[in-house]
Structures are given as structure tokens and as C-alpha cells.
Amino acid sequence: MSNFRDTGHLFRFAGIFVAAILIFLAIRGWLVPHTFGQYGHYRGAALNEIAAKPVHFAGHQSCETCHADIAEKKSSGKHASVHCEACHGPLAAHADDPSIQPAKIDTAVLCAQCHETSAAKPKGFPEVETASHSNGVSCETCHQPHSPALEAGGAQ
Amino acid sequence: MNMTRRQMLVLLPAAAVAWESLLAGTPESSPNYEQTQHWWGMLIDIPKCIGCGNCVRACQSENDVPDGYFRTWVERYHVTDTNLANPEVISPDGGKHGFPAAVEDSGKYFFVPKMCNHCADSPCTQVCPVGATFVGPDGVVLVDQKYCLGCAYCVQACPYGCRYIHPTKRVADKCTLCYHRITKGLTTACCEACPTGARQLVDLKNPKDPIHAFLKTHAVQVLKPQMATGAKAFYNELDGSVR
């Protein structure tokens, strides 16, 4: 009747084979992260994990919602395109909770970071030799940092 | 519980679907951010850079970059008519505290801010043996630090030297283009802190982005174009001596 005798061992072997495949798939399903391959050959969930990191620089839009007067003053001056946190440093903590006060700024250091004379700076950028320019008098005595030109509200 | 084989066969796929949705977890953290609607890059305007180092400091505080490591740094080039092929380049502490004063001479000086170029065909992601680094659907090259082995293949593969092994995490680390900021509608920390607008975050998929007009009207280059990396850090008025 059958061309094959003693076919039982074939079925037993096939059973072992199927079991091995199932075990492989189970281990693979357990080891490979669920979102792996969602967008490409990487863990898709990593995108959201990286995006969830905390922000330290609040962004000038956030500053301007409360400090509209400063933003207004700044908009007509030479520093119009300088964002708040370029000088004041990262202040997301202050934006979230205004009771956290920002650190005081040392203008002698801060202003010189950009405006100290160097032949390497692009032509036309306002530069001063701080040592001879003010003789140790701090910058904001004459220049209002939010609108630094002397005629635009300086103390002089 | 009594269950026929038929009921069992019907219930199994239903259970599988439920298990899948359980594993998928919570949906996106930035619900308004559509990854496929963006293709991010950076415009670096060389004539505007004054070498103040604000971007380097901002990057380090925004991203907790360890001391002595840089996701972005600024180089100062000094090119004279005798060293065109091999200019003098300095970057003291990545330009974090500015640069020593330069004196006028026969040569020219200029600053070149450097960072990850977020290449579309990035060499670094191609060599990763485990799929821990990748170009995201929005064109940002990122590292999955939970998956990274720290083998440093990518550090060697980057032609721009933009990656490092984090000294305490022992995994690859690099510029994320402030992915945690741009997905919330903010600009990057370096762009936010740049006083002269020398750095601009650009979205090449946004038809209203000024980058499109800028690219048409300016002499814009990328670094090492011969390597065909599809770099997306666009340099305006880049000097030919820059490597």
C-alpha cells in the first residue's frame, strides 16, 4: 500500500524540526526589541526616547511672553537679533518657575567674549580693546546691553 | 474552563493582537511632530561667525557633554599665500572660551564652526554592526544609546570627526541636532545661543524655509563633497582651504 515502510521516524524528525523553529522564533521575539524595524534597521522607540530629553534653553519666544518690555526695547537696537539666552545663559528652569532667579552676569567677561578686538573677526563687526577702551569701567555704565548704542539710551 | 478546539483557534489571534498593542507602549511624546514632514539640516554662515564660542558652551550645557568632548566646536583658520594647501588651524578647547587675539598680517583669518553634518548617506550609520545608529525619518543621525555596544566603528567611519565614545556611558555619542528641541518646535541650542545668526537650523522639506532662496543666491558648499555623504551642514562662503 505505502511505498515507504517505517515512516514514523520521518514524522518524529519533522516534529523536532518544527519545535526547533518555534523555539527559535520565541527566543527571537523575546530578544529583539519590539519596535526594531518600525522605521528601518533600528529601534523605533529610540526616537521618542531621545526626543523626551529635558530642554535647558527655553528659547526667546518663551522669554518674550513675560519680558515683552525688554523684547520691545531690544527690537530697535543693535542687539535685535541676539537671542536672550545668548547672553543670559540657559534659563528653561527660570521659565518654568520664575522664582528661580538667573545668575548675575559679569559684563566685563560677557561683552568681551564677542567684542574684544581680534584681526580674525569679520570686517565691520564692532570691536574694542577692552583694556584701553574703558579703563576698567564696566560696560553697562555707558552701554545698555539691550540697546547698546550710546545715543539709544546710554547713561552718557 | 472548557474550550473547544474551534474556540481556541478563534481566540489565539485575538490574544496575539492584544499582546502586540500591550508591547507597543505609549504613543509619541511629541504628538504634533510628524517625522516624515521634516528633513533637517544646518546652515553655517562663515562671514557671520565671530568665534565667541557661545555655540560650544550652549551645546555642552544643553546636552551635558563631558569636558574635553565636543558635539560642536569652532576652528580658526589662518591662511597665507604660502600655506594655502596646509593652513594653520587652531581650536583651543573647541573654541569654548574664544580664541587668542589675532594680529593683522598678510594672511586671512576666519572661523569654521563644525558639527555633525547629518549626512543623508552617512558613513557612520552604515558600519554599525547592531543597528544602534541610524538616519531618522526626518534626516537626523541619532544614536540609540541603549542598543550601542561602544565598538567605536562609527567613530572611525565619520569623515568629519564628529563622534566620540562617552567617557562614562561607554557608548557612542554625537550631535542629535537637539532632537529633543526640534521635535518641540524649538531651534537647536547652538542656534539659540549664536549672537550673530551664523548658525541656522533648516528644514529642507518646508517649502517656506528661507534656506531654499539662500541656496539659490549664495555660494554654499558642504564639507568633503567628494565623499558623497549627502552632508546637510551647508557652509556659506566656505574657503577652499577648509578640510
Image (cartoon, grey):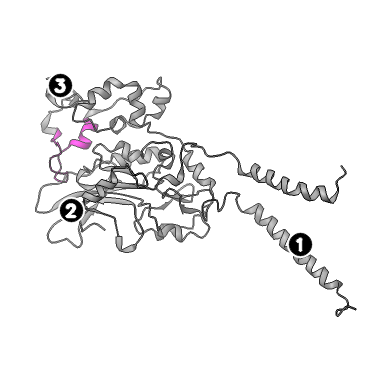
**Residue B70 seen by the camera:** no
Label 1 to label 3: alpha-carbon separation:
84 Å
Residue that numbered label 3 is attached to: A154
Q: Which residues are magenta?
A: A108-130
Left or right: residue A145 versus residue B153 is left
Label 2 to label 1: alpha-carbon separation:
69 Å
Circles 3 and 2 on the same chain: no
Residue that numbered label 1 is attached to: A19
Q: Residues within 10 Å of mark 2 (few under 14, many from 20)?
A: many
Q: Main secondary structure of the magenta part?
A: loop
Q: Which secondary structure, mark 2?
A: strand
Q: Quadrant of the N terminus of chain B?
A: top right
Residue B124, image x and y in percent? 42, 58
Residue A95, image x and y in percent? 39, 25
- Chain identity of mark 2: B
Q: Which secondary structure, mark 1?
A: helix
**Residue B5 seen by the camera:** yes
